[in-house]
Image: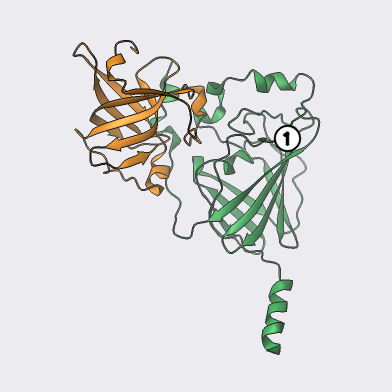
Amino acid sequence: MLGVAVVASQNAATPNRDLTGVWIGPYTPNLARGLTLRFQPGAEAAFTNHKGEDDPTSFCLPPGVPRALGSPFPIEILQDANTLTILYEYMHLFRRIPTDGRAHPADIEPTFMGDSVGRWEGDTLVVDVTGFNDKTWVDTEGHQHSDALHVVERYRRIGADTVDYQATIDDPKTYQQSWTASRVLTRHPEWTLKEYVCEENNKITRQP
Amino acid sequence: MMRRCRAVLLGLILFGSTVPLAGHHSVTAYYDTSRQLTLQGPIVSVEWTNPHAFVNIDVRDEHGGTTKWAIETDSPNVLSRAGWTRSTLHFGDQVTATGYPSKKGTAALRLVTLSLADGRKLKG
């Protein structure tokens, strides 16, 4: 009896930092659903007047972060002691996230997926993402962002096959306040990532 | 186009269901999700491709003419995880497709449900 109690205590004290596996979240076209966003002057028009057909992903461009996790396609997370790698089925993207304590590079070349560095806070992986270009949308709903976008993601195991995922969007050129989108990722051990070649038959780009 | 095919529209109902998955782009950017059309006809081809699969069917109008409708659905990746395979549908299969019509008025439909002659219903 004493032995069982000790084992349970050790398990409770050991943070679960294993995020490996194939995961998917609910398809989330509107990351700000239920929130009231306060835009910077002039920034709201870009959202309210946007045209759905201008969505960069319609042209097979990368969705950016956190939108890449709002698609109906799974991701696979690989981990070692110093790096977490996320493979995205959607658009065949990947992110390499160092977790060895390093900081962002001093001069980041802006990219679609940004530059990521991670650190563990107990059982939560906190990923700081910056260095974005302004060529993606925050979500399918058409929320926009600038090159000042800064995203903080939090991944925390909340069950054997579930992860709580939160993404805080901070873009002082677009929004007066940061805002957070949350969802639960579910693990699918029976799945493997499939090929996804967006350019294969993208009829949208074939239309005049 | 829409007027010519009036006879084949088996039903028109107001939007009352969840907009299908997209991921690649917004469904509402290209399709009128406030209403649904139902079409019937034989499959002439299936494009089992990314970013979206297409089921193309021939639909007869009231004048005896035939129009090829492009029924757009999800990525094969999503469909296969929902039970479809690349050989689920065949040339000549009679199907009934319910979905959202194109905003441009072309013969294009965003699939919500595809009913097969054997009673199976596939969600798009």
Q: Residue at x 42, y 36 (%)?
A: B74
Q: Nearer the viewer, residue B119 or A164?
A: B119
Residue A31, position in %: x, y?
64, 37
Q: Amino acid at mark 1?
A: Leu
Asked whether, in this view, residue B21 is left or right of residue B98, the answer is: right
Name the residue that disc number 1 marks: A149
Q: Residue at x 51, y 36 (%)?
A: B23
Mark 1 closeness class: few <14, some 14–19, many ≥20 residues within 10 Å: many
Colour green belongs to chain = A
Residue A145, position in %: x, y?
69, 30
In the image, residue B62 above or below residue A56: above
In the image, residue A20 above or below residue B99: below
Asked whether, in this view, residue A166 is left or right of residue A89, the answer is: right
Colour orange belongs to chain = B
Image quadrant for the C terminus of chain A?
top left
In the image, residue B31 above or below residue B111: above
Asked whether, in this view, residue A72 is left or right of residue B9, the answer is: right
Q: Secondary structure at mark 1?
A: loop
